[in-house]
Amino acid sequence: MGSDLTSGNWLWGNGSVAAITRTIVHGVPKPKNHTGAMPPVGGVQLSQADLAAVADYVWAIGHQNVH
């Protein structure tokens, strides 16, 4: 239902941790390439540390094939 986070293609920013964090915080109410909307913070409560960990994880999996 959502974008492939491992592809290295960034629809909502430049792929930086800051851009990924903004996307997580604000959500994706109107997706560009799929039908699955994402509510702000995924619809759950996250501490700042957990938010940072999720953003770092998404960055890592999205940049694993970039050399």
Image: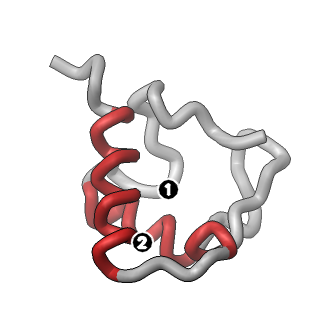
Contact (CB < 8 A) between labels 2 and 1?
yes
Figure label count: 2
Quarter of the image that includes the N terminus: top right
Relative image position of residue 17 (x, y in whole percent)? 27, 58
Q: Position of residue 63 (x, y in %)?
A: 28, 31
Q: Residue at x 29, y 74 (%)?
A: 49
Quick one: SS at disc 2? Answer: helix
Closest to the observer: 25 or 32? 25
- Specify whether 64 is left or right of 51: left
Q: Identity of the amino acid at label 1?
A: Trp
Residue drawn at x 75%, y 63% as measured from the top left: 30
Residue 11 percent coordinates (x, y): 52, 47
Res. 22 mark: 2
Disc on res. 12:
1
Q: Closer to the camera: disc 2 or disc 1?
A: 2
Mark 1: few/some/many CA within 10 Å (<14, 14-19, 20+): some
Picture residue at 50% right of the left edge, 36% below the top: 5
| Amino acid type at image mark 2 | Arg
Q: Position of residue 29 (x, y in %)?
A: 73, 69
Q: Is residue 64 left or right of residue 9?
A: left
Q: Alpha-carbon distance for marks 2 and 1?
A: 9 Å
> Which quadrant would residue 59 be assigned to in this image?
top left
Rendered view: 62 above or below 16: above
Task: Name the secondary structure under disc 1.
Answer: loop
Residue at x-position 33% and y-position 81%: 48
